[in-house]
Amino acid sequence: MSTDVQTILKLSVPVIVQVGERHLPVENVLALAPGAILELNKSAEAPLDLLVNNKPIGEGNAVKVGENFGIQVSAINSRSELVQALGGG
């Protein structure tokens, strides 16, 4: 592998674990306050979405790691889908 490819492979990218999604009118967003509860479009048992560049790359289940939350990856998309998510067309 060329040096350029090795450099690219070492880049850090943000990985997002998406619990769920909800669309709200702006007036409802502005009315949010501490203690507010937003019902999401997923059941508590459903797998969480794993995103890179706001594109899905896989899914997994929530786990507790010490005092933190984590995700146990249960599925990863194909290599070509991963490259597309990373912006490789």
Image: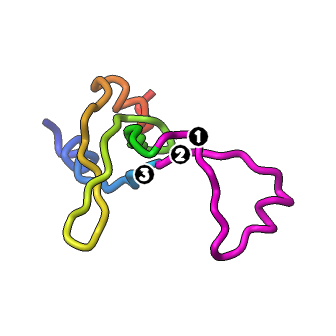
Q: Contact, CB < 8 Å: mark 1 with mark 2?
A: yes
Q: Secondary structure at mark 2?
A: loop
- Name the image quarter holding residue 23: top right
The residue stretch that appears in magenta: 19-43
Kindly identify which numbered label has been placed on residue 41: 1
Q: Quadrant of the N terminus?
A: top left
Of the residues shown, which amino acid type is indicated by label 1?
Answer: Asn
Residue designated by label 3? 16
Could you say which is closer to the camera, residue 60 or residue 80? 60
In this orientation, which residue lies closer to the viewer: 26 or 86?
A: 26
The residue carrying pointer 3 sits among few (fewer than 14), some (14 to 19) or many (20 or more) residues within 10 Å by Cα, namely: some
Whether residue 35 sits left or right of residue 26 in the image: it is left
Tell me how far mark 3 sits from mark 2, CA to CA.
12 Å
The amino acid type, in three-letter code, at marker 2 is Gly
The percent position of residue 71, horizontal first and vertical second, equals 29, 51
Magenta region's main secondary structure? loop
Q: Nearer the viewer, mark 1 or mark 3?
A: 1
In-image side of 30 versus 13 (left or right): right
Q: Which residue is the extreme one toward the bottom?
A: 34
Residue 61: percent from left, percent from top: 31, 44
Q: Quadrant of the C terminus?
A: top left
Q: Would you place residue 62 above or below residue 76 in this image?
A: below
Where is mark 2, residue-wise?
Answer: 20
> Disc 3 marks which amino acid?
Ile
